[in-house]
Amino acid sequence: MKPYDNSAWFLVLPALVIVTFVGILPLVAVTNYSFQDLFSLNNPYWVGIDWYRNIVTSERFYASLGRSFLFSAIVLSIQLPLGIWIALLLQRSHRFIVSTVLVLITVPLVVPWNMIPVIWLNFINPNMGLAGRMLAWLGVGFDYKFNALHTWIVLVVMDTWHWLGLVVVLAYAGISSIPPAYYQAAAIDAASPWQVFRFIQLPKMKTVLSMALLLRFMDSFMIYIEAFRINAGGPDSATAFLSLDLGEEIQAFNYGPSAARSIVYFLIVLTVAWSFKAATSTRAPVTMAPAK
Amino acid sequence: MELQGSDEHSGACHDGAREVKTLGRIILFAVIGAFVLVPLAQTIMTSFVSTLPRAGIVEGHFSLINYQNIFHSAVLKQAILNSIIYVVLNVALCLGVGLPAAYAFARYSFVGDRQLFFLLLVFRITPTVVLSLPIFVLFAQIGLENTPVGIALVHCVFNIPIAIWILEGFIASVPREFDETAFLDGHSLPSFFFRHLVPAIAPGIGVTAFFCFIFSWVEVVLARILTTTGGKPITMAINALFGFRTDFGLVTAMTVLALVPGVAMIYFVRNHLAKGFVIRT
């Protein structure tokens, strides 16, 4: 048990001051704007919940919400299993291979977000791009501009390229924190590889994996720059995700409506974070089930 | 890393089967490496080619003209400097306030600790686009727009939570007796932090700095809204290069340069990433 001491607040205070300044204060301001019509910031006009009513009664909002959920679901169902699988394979590999693969796979994480779509558009360009020419040579009529399915494929592959490294690093961190004694015990009990995974590795990876799940969910759910640069929400709004709608309104300096939209999105984030916390803290501790 | 017992049914597993498995793994890793590198390779190749007609250079042939152009451009050099300033400031700030906070979370329980932790979690996952409008207004009012300091400060909203999580895991793995011995030796809290705790969790500091660095280096939404007229970092300087007649070679050369510090960081922390670390929620 950790000792109870309220003077520990002095230690967290500097961090809290900064977070208040760049996080809480802006949230308060945006809440305030969301109830007003602000043609300019000096002429506020109270409109109550009008902006909110506009958002929650528009079909476009629900369509974007659905698309964002679908995108997150696809991205998570590819990246999490793939990342865990790679981490499991790495764990049985030589040290040198491990650090080489980890270095390689994390490189896309340091690419500035506005350059990721530029790199990929360059790559799939039918005249110059390696992938574009390859597809043309194979006779695949690939058209990410006007074919919605193809735009989706580009976005999913690009997002996987970008973020797989994070999932692998986190999953590998989880696996390598398992003491060898666990494996020895499993070997004595002649546990199958699946049992080792299910009853030793997965429970031990639980916290880092839930972190990976949360980070990947939120970042894909609110994908903005990358999706916008590929096809600006097209074709025919097929890739108009939640953030693109908000970005559009901010670009137009519609203070009131974009503030209300920000608050709605923040409430979604809050709900997700809260249910995530509830799910991870109420789950019964996994005991080591003896494999026979 | 060969762990005992990780080769599952050792009795049934012949050497031949194991070799096939190892080979399969290596092929798979090669495929992953190719998936990561090939899209980048094209960008790197383009950066060494002149993409606009220029006197004395054949279009499409190898040339260092794009890199030379960067070092002849005051705007682009300033952008590189701006990026370095804001990211160094941000990492220093996050480590500076994150370390004591992580220590508090790792060693004590106090009123509202769980709520505070939850608040940090929420701000880590709040999309930057949600906060961008009020941050723009707020920072314009207090004169923190168009400067790298503003970006460094704003990126704390998602990097302080990251710093606290990672550092907390590292501090918690140090036994409490370690602190008590130092305090018995007459160390004050600051002196304990610098002389004992920081050296003991040095890999943790490295991993934390790495994650703060990458998340700050690549962020563009807040960086864009805060630098409309000046103080532009590399990312925004690249955006400004797009126009009627884009010098695509120059764009890719800037992108490649933007990757260098990140790749260097990865190289330095590779063994610590490979050793693993603990993040708790």
Image: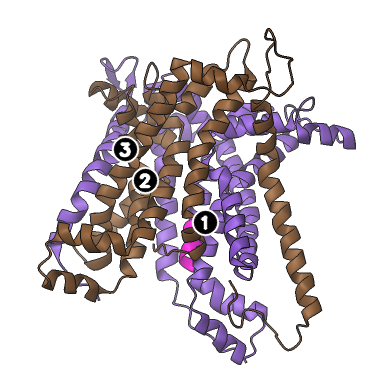
Chain colours: A purple, B brown
A207 in magenta: yes
Between discs 3 and 2, the one toward the N terminus = 3
Q: Are marks 3 and 2 in contact (CB under 8 Å)?
A: no
- Say whether mark 3 and mark 1 are on the same chain: no
Mark 1 vs mark 2: in front: 2
Q: So how many labels did they put on this image?
A: 3
**Crowd rating for badge 2 (residues with CA inside 10 Å; few <14, some 14–19, many 20+):** many
Instruction: Identify the residue position indicated by label 2 in the image.
Output: B159
Residue B67 image position (x, y, % from top left): 57, 23
Which quarter of the image is occupied by the N terminus of chain B?
bottom right
Quadrant for residue B86, please give it.
Answer: top left
Q: Name the amino acid, label 3.
A: Leu
Is B161 placed above or below B66 here? Answer: below
Residue B157 image position (x, y, % from top left): 34, 42
Q: Name the amino acid, label 1.
A: Leu
Q: Which mark is residue A213?
A: 1
Which quarter of the image is occupied by the C terminus of chain B?
bottom left
Visible residue check, residue B80: yes
